[in-house]
Image (tube, rainbow, N blue to C red):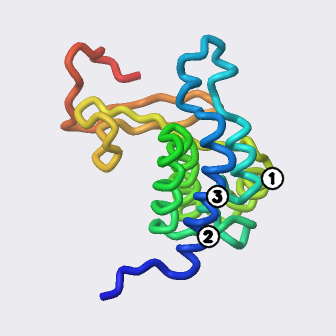
């Protein structure tokens, strides 16, 4: 079995490495975590520059103008970004992960509504925050379900789920 990278994968790594060397390395974004002003901490110029090079939309389907990257492609790109700054790599990786979920799980109508706005906005990032009482951030075995109504949410415990120590007995 040949584990060599394809020509397209080598080209992707080279492009992301060039981006890292030209954009991330000179500004050392990891040093920003010590800046007092929260507005100055986040490296928007890196996100915008990456978006301009197609990195932010790398995981979006090609039918919507994205890169259509595979999981391996995304791992290669993330590794190269992380060599410059782990925080920047996480910014892009979170967006890629959720982009793939939307592409896989959304209806065609939902994709048609979401992807054009996502592709066009250089600052459109995605992230998810989850903490399960008995499983921390492992979302593969959720004990809580969510119901969304008109901008409000309500959580309910599933039968047999356990609560974290010190948590309320009411999961609403």
Q: Position of residue 2 (x, y in %)?
A: 35, 86
Disc 3 versus disc 1: nearer the observer = 3
Residue 109 shown left or right of residue 127 in the figure: right
- Name which residue lies at 54% across and 22% down: 33
Lower position in the chain sequence, tag 2 or tag 3: 3
| Mark 1 and mark 2 residues within 8 Å of each other at the beta carbon | no
How many C-alpha atoms fall within 10 Å of the one at disc 3: few (<14), some, or many (≥20)?
few
C-alpha distance separating marks 2 and 3: 20 Å
Residue 53 shown left or right of residue 95 in the figure: right
Residue 140 shown left or right of residue 48 in the figure: left
Q: Where is residue 106 in the image (x, y as percent from the top left)?
A: 59, 59
Lower position in the chain sequence, tag 3 or tag 1: 3
Of residues 63 and 17, the one nearer the viewer is: 17
Disc 2 versus disc 3: nearer the observer = 3
Q: Name the residue under label 3.
A: 18
- Name which residue lies at 56% across and 54% down: 96
> Which secondary structure, mark 1?
helix
Q: Position of residue 21 (x, y in %)?
A: 62, 50
Of residues 42 and 152, the one nearer the viewer is: 42
C-alpha distance separating marks 1 and 2: 16 Å
Q: Name the residue under label 2.
A: 68
> Which secondary structure, mark 3?
helix
Q: Mark 1 points at which residue?
A: 120
């Amino acid at each position: 079995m040949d584990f060599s990278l394809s020509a397209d994968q080598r080209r992707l790594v080279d492009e992301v490495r060039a981006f890292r060397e030209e954009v991330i390395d000179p500004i050392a974004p990891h040093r920003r975590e010590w800046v007092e002003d929260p507005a100055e901490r986040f490296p928007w110029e890196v996100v915008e520059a990456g978006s301009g090079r197609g990195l932010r939309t790398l995981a979006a389907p090609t039918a919507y103008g994205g890169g259509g990257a595979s999981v391996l492609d995304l791992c290669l790109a993330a590794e190269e970004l992380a060599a410059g700054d782990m925080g920047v790599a996480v910014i892009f990786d979170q967006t890629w992960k959720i982009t793939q979920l939307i592409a896989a799980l959304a209806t065609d109508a939902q994709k048609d509504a979401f992807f054009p706005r996502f592709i066009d906005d250089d600052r459109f990032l995605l992230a998810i925050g989850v903490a399960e009482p008995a499983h921390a951030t492992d979302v593969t075995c959720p004990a809580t379900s969510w119901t969304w109504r008109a901008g409000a949410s309500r959580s309910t415990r599933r039968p047999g789920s356990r609560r974290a120590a010190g948590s309320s007995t009411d999961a609403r």
